[in-house]
Image (spheres, rainbow, N blue to C red):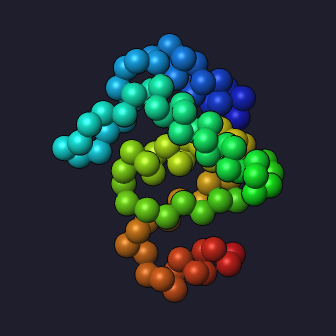
């Protein structure tokens, strides 16, 4: 499953390079090319801070194109994403992170 998802993400980026992939409400589109570049940049950061596959990465934010890119970056790096909604109470966020 992991390999198929990563291959699907990679193939989608390659085959739709110039096409719009994501956008924020009433904002410009973000191309597959930019999504791919941002994913690669995030992967470099993960390498620098020594994230291993199967490490858990908390993802907290509002629904946005950057949230989606962050999610795809974590998943395609083979880490485990722990999504949290931005309206969670701070105590709940702290509990999730601690757990």
Relative vertical location of residue 66 with respect to residue 56 in this rendering, above or below: above
72 in relation to 98, above or below: above
Is residue 89 shown left or right of residue 24? right
Q: Residue furthest left?
A: 26
In the drawing, does residue 28 fall left or right of residue 71?
Answer: left
Q: How many callouts does the rendering have?
A: 0
Name the spot of residue 39 as percent of width and height, x first.
58, 38
- The image quadrant of residue 42 is top right
Q: Residue at x 54, y 33 (%)?
A: 37
> In this view of the protein, can residue 54 be seen by the observer?
no
Question: Residue at (53%, 77%) from the top-left corner?
Answer: 93
Q: Position of residue 68 (x, y in %)?
A: 46, 45
Residue 65 visible in the current orientation: yes
Image coordinates of residue 90 in percent, x first then y, are: 48, 83
- Name the outermost residue toward the top: 15
Please tell me in which quadrant of the rendered image residue 40 appears. top right
Q: Nearer the viewer, residue 91 or 70?
A: 70
The x, y position of residue 50, in whole percent, is 80, 55
Quadrant where the C terminus is found in the figure: bottom right
Q: Residue at x 70, y 59 (%)?
A: 56
Q: Is residue 98 left or right of residue 32?
A: right
Q: Residue at x 48, y 34 (%)?
A: 35
């Amino acid at each position: 499953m992991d390999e198929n998802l990563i291959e699907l993400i990679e193939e989608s980026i390659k085959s739709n390079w110039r096409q719009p992939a994501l956008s924020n409400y009433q904002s410009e589109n973000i191309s597959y090319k930019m999504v791919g570049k941002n994913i690669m940049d995030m992967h470099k950061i993960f390498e620098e801070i020594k994230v291993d596959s199967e490490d858990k990465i908390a993802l907290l934010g509002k629904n946005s194109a950057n949230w989606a890119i962050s999610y795809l970056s974590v998943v395609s790096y083979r880490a485990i994403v722990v999504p949290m909604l931005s309206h969670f109470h701070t105590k709940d966020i702290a509990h999730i992170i601690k757990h």
